[in-house]
Image: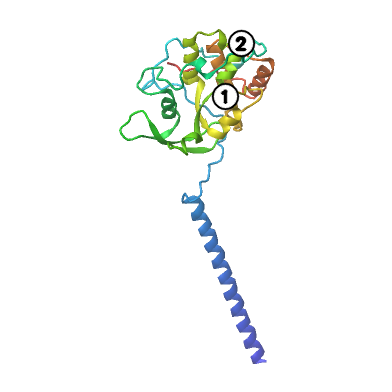
């Protein structure tokens, strides 16, 4: 009987040892995975922020007002929407990017081109290229269309991951009244900080020339601001909305009826 009890004790010890080895191995795996994901070996995006999201327009410390840009008065976006003309889209005939001037000019004459102005405005922890006070080399921001934290690094293979989006696409503007603007007014529209946002490259490509009826940000917390910004741009440049576009805007603003127009306070 003593032999049986002794064998039982040895079996129990071996069992405890086996379980200890298993638990130690599991802890090691968990620790390794934690290090892998949090140490930068694998980029983990932050989840979308909760609550309404806003976005900047103008920083008077280093941006200058554009000559000829129309002011947008503070008002409820829904009221401003009701004041916009409602028409079908005009033909796209004659549209070309050059109708809005050369891309990314230094229109406000602050010494920096528009793309770098917007990167500097929208990104945090901005790093400039060596020897430059304009050329943005790196930065981070909470990207508005996805709601995820995105890093920008200038380079042949990385710059396109963050693009500068025209909130009202230039092709859409052309079909909703910009054909009647002067070349100078169109150039201002294409470079107006009100109409520009740093955005996730793939999301911007997916948007294309879509209006609110065909594309909205995946980040639902940003949709009220986004629609109000489109309304503000169309107000500033006397553009119209299509019936479907207006219906989509009203649907979005129905969840935020006190949303204001977006204006720069410049």
Task: State the SS at label 1.
Answer: helix
Left or right: 81 in relation to 124: right
The quadrant holding residue 220 is top right
Q: Which residue occupies 59% across, 74% down? A: 18
Task: State the SS at label 2.
Answer: loop
Q: Identify the image quadrant of the C terminus.
A: top left
Q: Position of residue 172 (x, y in %)?
A: 59, 18
Q: Mark 2 points at which residue?
A: 84
Q: Identify the image quadrant of the N terminus.
A: bottom right
Q: Position of residue 63 (x, y in %)?
A: 39, 20
Q: Count neighbours of disc 2 (C-alpha within 10 A) and say few if under 14, some if 14 to 19, many if 20 or more.
A: some
The quadrant holding residue 27 is bottom right
Q: In this view, does 186 lie above or below 112?
A: above
Q: Residue furthest left?
A: 131
Q: Name the residue under label 1.
A: 226
Q: Count neighbours of disc 1 (C-alpha within 10 A) and say few if under 14, some if 14 to 19, many if 20 or more.
A: many
Q: Where is residue 243 in the image (x, y as percent from the top left)?
A: 69, 15
Q: Which residue occupies 32% across, 35% down? A: 130
């Amino acid at each position: 009987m003593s032999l049986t009890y002794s064998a039982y004790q040895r079996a129990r010890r071996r069992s405890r040892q086996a379980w200890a080895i298993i638990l130690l191995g599991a802890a090691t795996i968990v620790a390794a995975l934690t290090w892998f994901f949090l140490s930068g070996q694998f980029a983990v995006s932050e989840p979308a922020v909760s609550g309404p999201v806003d976005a900047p327009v103008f920083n008077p410390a280093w941006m200058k007002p554009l000559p000829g840009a129309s002011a947008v008065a503070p008002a409820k976006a829904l009221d401003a929407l009701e004041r916009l003309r409602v028409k079908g889209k005009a033909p796209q005939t004659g549209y070309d990017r050059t109708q809005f001037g050369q891309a990314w000019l230094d229109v406000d004459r602050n010494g920096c081109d528009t793309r770098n102005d917007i990167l500097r405005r929208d990104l945090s922890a901005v790093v400039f290229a060596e020897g430059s006070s304009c050329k943005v080399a790196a930065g981070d921001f909470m990207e508005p269309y996805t709601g995820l934290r995105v890093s920008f690094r200038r380079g042949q293979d990385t710059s396109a991951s963050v693009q500068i989006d025209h909130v009202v696409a230039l092709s859409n503007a052309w079909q909703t009244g910009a054909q009647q603007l002067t070349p100078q007014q169109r150039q201002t529209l294409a470079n107006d900080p009100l109409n520009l946002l740093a955005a996730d490259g793939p999301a911007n490509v997916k948007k294309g020339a879509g209006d609110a009826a065909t594309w909205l940000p995946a980040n639902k917390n940003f949709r009220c601001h986004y629609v109000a910004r489109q309304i503000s741009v169309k107000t500033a440049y006397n553009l119209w909305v299509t019936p479907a576009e207006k219906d989509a805007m009203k649907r979005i603003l129905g969840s935020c009826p006190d949303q204001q127009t977006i204006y720069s306070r410049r």
